[in-house]
Amino acid sequence: MFASSTLSLLESSLPSLPKMLLAPSLRHDLDDLVAMVAAPGTVAVVDDNDTATVMGDALARALKSRYNVIRIPCGKAPHADAETVKLIRRKSKSAHTLIAAGSGTISDLCKYASHLDGKPYICFPTAASMNGYLSANASITVDGYKTTFPAHL
């Protein structure tokens, strides 16, 4: 996909290149996709009420044969704010990988929390309209102000 010189530059600039799979449907087993990134152990699946039914529940079911799964539901309309980041970090303390089942808000929360804790981050996006999946920052509201923080790609 990249010229060898570009790939060398990327590899030297990033601790690890993000992996991205684009497909009209998931024909792989979800646990095999997660295993491409996550080591055996405990994973935390983060979702909201809507994305749980679309992706979070299926992920948790598929992963429980290979991983210890922690569910972190973020309610009906979660906010990407400092309090929710703290909640996710606290509830995922024993997890070695965070998995976002959702779009903008859930993705930003997980990629920022995982960045702070030095854990891998995986996103199963639920909306094609959001474009921040490979962004190296997250928009988090702190003290009423939306702030951009460094985060995992």
Image: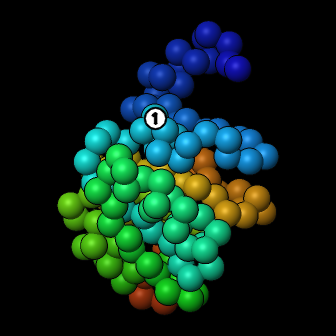
Residue 114 appears in the figure: no
Q: Residue furthest top?
A: 4
**Amino acid type shown at disc 1:** Met
Q: Residue furthest front?
A: 65
- Image: 74 above or below 100: below
Left or right: where does residue 63 sit relative to residue 42? Answer: right
Q: Nearer the viewer, residue 144 or 72?
A: 72
Q: On the image, numbered disc 1 is attached to which residue?
A: 36
Q: Position of residue 144 (x, y in %)?
A: 48, 89
- Image: 52 above or below 8: below
Neighbourhood count class around disc 1 (C-alpha, 10 Å): few under 14, some 14–19, many 20 upward? few
Q: Looking at the image, what colour scheme do you see? A: rainbow
Q: Position of residue 31 (x, y in %)?
A: 47, 45
Residue 15 appears in the figure: yes
The number of callouts visible is 1
In percent of the image, x 56 and y 73: which residue is there?
A: 52
In percent of the image, x 46 and y 28: which residue is there?
A: 13
In percent of the image, x 49 and y 38: which residue is there?
A: 32
Q: Secondary structure at mark 1?
A: loop
Q: Nearer the viewer, residue 33 or 106?
A: 33
Q: Nearer the viewer, residue 2 or 125?
A: 125
- Image: 30 above or below 89: above
Left or right: where does residue 133 sit relative to residue 12? Answer: right
Quarter residue 89 falls in: bottom left
